[in-house]
Image (tube, rainbow, N blue to C red):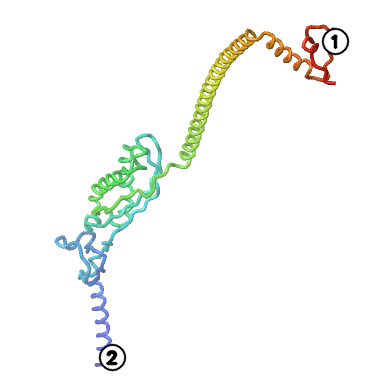
Amino acid sequence: MNRTALGAFGIAAVVLLFIASSSLFIVHQGEQALVLRFGAVADPENPVKGPGLHIKKPFIEDVVRYDARLLDVDPPAEQVILADQKRIEVDTYTRFRIQDPLLFYQAVRTEEGARARLREIVNNSLRRVLGNVMLPSVLSSEREQIMHEIQQQVSETAKSLGVSVADVRIRRADLPAETSQAIFRRMESERQREAAEARAQGYERAQQIRASADRERTIILAEAQKQAQILRGQGDGDANRIYAEAFSADPNFFAFYRSLSAYRQALGDTNTTYVLAPDSDFFKFFHNAPDRR
């Protein structure tokens, strides 16, 4: 084989290799592809090509590949107004899969176009659903039902894009910073008001208890004084009766006893000086006293 024939064979091999590379394409696992001819589907009967080796017409047909796995949409947090006019910042994420590549191509062309449309759909459904609920519902166990309703609306709308929505989740729902500060200040004022009210009620209750205790103390003291007066009167009456009985039994002894009591009270203090006549009745019981000298 001469050089000319060898060169022609090499050129033919290169051309055949180029044509083969332009005619054959591989769809990897986890991918799905469309073969387009001048922007339209080349094979309407079998538009979607699954994993494997496939043939296309070179130069006039192109291959568009799409991911067959779950894809994500992670939009920035959005401020939403709830039914009670509260504003919250809602951070969501969405998982979707390209279900119908042909419809997907016709509707949005690319995955980025699908993400942009899905962000808009999720945002609209989010505002529509959350606009009918109160803040406590978003923060309670009802949140799961709210997310389910949002997912249903998003899934229904996303069918027109050729995608199926696997999940829509509210990752975080917070009050805006300025609203949080206002709520914290209002909560602080409310707690201070409740504390002041509790202190006032406690002071009032203490006054009532103190007044009741003072009243009971006064009643008890008055009752005790009454009983003391009664007992004192009874004691004085008994003493007078006893004195009267003793006096009537022996008047001389009673007079002697009373004089001794008077001597004890009058002369008990050694510093006391009395100036009396010797024949005074006060000293009548000393007249007959025995001399102890």
With 204 as the anchor, is 257 left or right in this view? right
At a point 51% along the width and 28% down the height, the residue shown is 202
Outermost residue, bottom side? 1
Please state which amino acid type lies under the numbered disc 2: Arg
Q: Which mark is residue 3?
A: 2
> Which quadrant: the N terminus?
bottom left
Q: Which mark is residue 201?
A: none
With 236 as the anchor, is 118 left or right in this view? left
At a point 34% along the width and 52% down the height, the residue shown is 93
Residue neighbourhood size for the residue with mark 1, other residues' Cα within 10 Å, grouped as few (<14), some (14–19), many (≥20): few
Viewer-proximal residue, 169 or 283? 283
Image coordinates of residue 241 in percent, x first then y, are 59, 10
User: Mark 2 or mark 1, which has the lower sequence index?
Assistant: 2
Vertical relation: 7 (above or below) 273: below
Residue for badge 1 = 275
Image coordinates of residue 70 in percent, x first then y, are 29, 59
Q: Is the C-beta separation of discs 2 and 1 under 8 Å?
A: no
Vertical relation: 205 (above or below) 143: above
Q: Quadrant of residue 220?
A: top right
Viewer-proximal residue, 236 or 120? 236
At numbered mark 1, what does the secondary structure look like: helix, strand or loop? loop
At numbered mark 2, what does the secondary structure look like: helix, strand or loop? helix
Image coordinates of residue 117 in percent, x first then y, are 31, 50
Vertical relation: 189 (above or below) 208: below
